[in-house]
Amino acid sequence: MCTKQLIKVVILVGSRDFGRCPVASRLPTALWPVTGKPAIEHLLVHLANQGIKQVVICSNGEGSLLAESIHADSRLELRFLDEQLPVGTAGCIRDAASGETDGLLLVFPASIVCPPKIDVLIKAHRDGKSELTVMLNPRYGISNMLGQAAGIFIGKPSLVEYIPKEGYSDIKEGLISEMLHAGKAINLAILSSNPGNFRDRQGYLCAISDYLENTKRINGDLKLCKHDSYVIWKGHNVSIEPGARIYGRVVILDNTQIATGAVVFGPAILGRNVSIGRDSIVINSVLWDGAKVGPNCEIQRCVFDYGAIVRSNTVVEEKSIPFKPEGMLESSITRVLKGAKNNVSRLRSALQPRFDQINKKLPNLIQSHKRNILPWFVVSFVLIAFLWSYWPGIVDVWDIWQRSDEYSSGLLVPFLVVYILWSRRKEISQCHIKPSIWGVFAFLAAQAVRIFGLFFMYSSAERLSIVLSIAALVLLLFGWQFFRKVATVLLFLSLMLPWPNRFQAAVAMPLQRWATSSAVFCLEIMGYEVMREGNIIHIGQATVAVAEACNGLRMVMAFFVVSGLVVLLIKRTWWEKLMILVSSLPIALLCNTVRLAITALAFTVLSGEHWEKVFHDFGGYAMMPLALAAVVTELWLLAKLTTLQTKGEAIIITPQKR
């Protein structure tokens, strides 16, 4: 018999979801609120009410944020375990167990809304008579016989023996696999109800729906109001104006206002200080504290970040609405419309007459002087206006460069563009400057792309409009001859932008599988005995996990930048330059495979966090000389091939000349 005082609960906090969900990129899902409190805090209260004493919260770099955001229950002995390197779910259990030999280990995901009772989990584990029990969600339909994993595990402390003492190890692909190989039984138990574990917006909304449907008492401070068409839990100072309608199960927290004509369909949660404008519709959504919905909007299955704002006459479906400083969207659109209607047309009409007037009235010396000053003055004015209008978008791109390893190479692109233009300054200075009216239409098209991104929350469209606007302004101010001279440089400038989230998500998993399989192939070719389990590589006594960050996308982006720079600087035929650009993809994948293979071999000899950090953080930089050597070799081979082809033609032509 195991008393609850001997049970140690390990809570696994997942990492942030960079690039796919803007809200999850800013805030870990463990801190997403459920009726005003973070999800992990609900779990801690539930554990304390069940008599649990020992709790360890494992995270990867989020320890200080969690400690500041959680109001810890005094009944718990709470410990934060902040892993500096990725160790995997099983690695967290190993580090949290810290030599325990008695009792039980209970593993919970931090992002859970309706955790099951501890007694139910203990009984399921005891009935299974195994060292590890995996809890499954209830069955849905006949085809899904077992249900999905709930992320809840119960086991004896002895299961730590099957986890490597150091490095990365996952529960599903590492611990369970090792236990099965050792002949140990794994018990599968099905929960009676869905615990509401989630990892993204869609799972969060489903968990909230189950929570409101099955929970009888949500919060003692909320007033319960029942009716045939609704069940409302209301906080203090809630204002529901006459004419507003509510259907289904809805939680409305303190100081929230719902205007006349607004309709709220549950399940839904409206946080503190939320406002719903006149004639707006909110369907199956969760609005966090301070969120605002303008008049005549339609919101369906959305999650609003703290302080997020949606302006009037907006339709948003299946989105996570991030926080933006109030007035940013309105001011950005106003600036775009004003620039499209007034400034561009005035600038176009003013440029040519000024040049004509200078040519007629001023002496040659002054005329030459003015021709040098006036264009630079106009260009400087346009540059300042452009930076003022696009400053929020530029800051957003800068933040992506700082926090994303995949797109950190984009920081170099603007500086490389300046260098390329400087190296071509003699050719560019010979271009005849003649502003083109077509630049106005190109600029309007770029602003249309920007407005589309602003209204429909496509950040990739907003970023793309930056490069499109620069190209349009170049055409407007300097004309077609100048534009054709720098067109390839403007195209190279687009490499500073991150890929759209959907495209990145579509290629991330195939690249990760390719990196794993190619590394295994290389190790087998060298004569090593290697075993692959998913994205885990076992070589000797070492285990190497090919995480999503190691899928090679960072090298692909960096080598595209390097290849593009080489193509713009060298003087070769068009087909040679095309071959260099096309070959950058296989070279990047090859270098990433070499890096993974070398890392796996190094882990068979070296151990410890220091060496893991060296190979994890700096292994990619070591491949840059290899990639440059491959590009230089390719240029040499192309030069030899061109020379041989020229000599062959000369041999054929020579007899004809004689």
Image: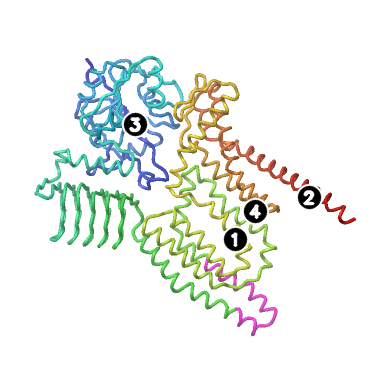
Q: Earlier in the sequence, mark 4 or mark 2?
A: 4
Mark in the foreground, 2 or 3: 2
- Which residue is labeled 1 in the image? 487
Left or right of 453 on screen, residue 559: right
Q: Nearer the viewer, residue 375 or 432?
A: 432
The circle on residue 525 is none
Q: Amino acid at mark 1?
A: Ala
The crowding category of the residue bearing disc 3, from other C-alpha atoms within 10 Å (few below 14, some 14 to 19, many at least 20), is: many
The crowding category of the residue bearing disc 4, from other C-alpha atoms within 10 Å (few below 14, some 14 to 19, many at least 20), is: some
At horizontal 44% and vertical 43% (from top left) the residue drawn is: 506
| Vertical placement of residue 535 versus 605, above or below | below
Q: Indicate the position of residue 425 as horizontal and vertical percent values.
A: 67, 61
Q: Amino acid at mark 4?
A: Leu
Mark in the foreground, 4 or 2: 2
- CA distance for labels 3 and 4: 48 Å
Q: Amino acid at mark 3?
A: Leu
At horizontal 49% and vertical 47% (from top left) the residue drawn is: 401
Circles 4, 2 touching at the beta carbon (< 8 Å) = no
The crowding category of the residue bearing disc 2, from other C-alpha atoms within 10 Å (few below 14, some 14 to 19, many at least 20), is: few
Q: Nearer the viewer, residue 201 or 2?
A: 201
- CA distance for labels 1 and 4: 11 Å
The circle on residue 568 is 4
Left or right of 458 on screen, residue 466: right
